[in-house]
Amino acid sequence: MYYIIIQESKGSVVDEQNIDIEFLILADLAQVIGGKLHMMGGGWDRINVQNFPHIQSFSIATAISVPWAHTNEKHNIMITMVDEDGQQELFKIEGEFEVGRAPGIKPGSSQRLMMAFTVNSLKFSEPKVYSIISFIDGQEIRRLEFNVIPTPVLQAKMSNQQQSA
């Protein structure tokens, strides 16, 4: 069961001079086709797990707002995931992008670049809070937290094991 609540720890303030990540969304599946985001099972903030370790594949969808002054330039993007202590990096996605100026667009207009990334077979060993962190040109722009939690049945089983130890 997934809940559709996203917790973002950094607000989105429109800044016409800087590149912004408008959103990060976790989804069961996401892809961008023809500049449009297609998503299934999107917007969740927790994974309910029946057993540990748990293997999960998922997608990360994002939209990047590129101001006019930063079009036709190469930029770096990095998306990483860390555990609640920030000590363990579970994956890192790195790439480069360049947004051109679309023909006929009003001078000074920002442009949106949609991206989707798939994370395959990630292993979760225990209940924790995880953070997806996005960076543009080395600067953290947006952070999204989600929880991996045991189902009530697993929680009871784990509690019974701790009591008998």
Image (tube, helix red, strand yellow):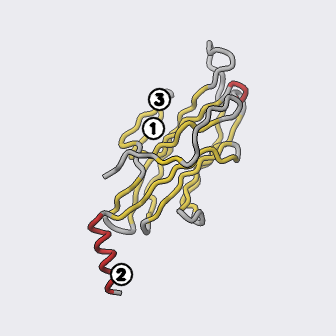
Label placed on residue 162 = 2
- Name the element at disc 1: strand
Label placed on residue 36 = 3
Spatial distance from mark 2 to mark 1, Cα to Cα?
42 Å
Residue linked to disc 1: 31
Of mark 2 and mark 1, the one earlier in the sequence is: 1
Q: Residues within 10 Å of mark 1 (few under 14, many from 20)?
A: many
Q: Amino acid at mark 3?
A: Lys
Q: Amino acid at mark 2?
A: Gln
Q: Nearer the viewer, mark 2 or mark 1?
A: 2
Q: Amino acid at mark 1?
A: Gln
Q: Residues within 10 Å of mark 3 (few under 14, many from 20)?
A: few
Spatial distance from mark 1 to mark 3, Cα to Cα?
8 Å
Quarter occupied by residue 71: top right
- Name the element at disc 3: strand
Of residues 34 and 21, the one drawn nearer to the viewer in this rendering: 21
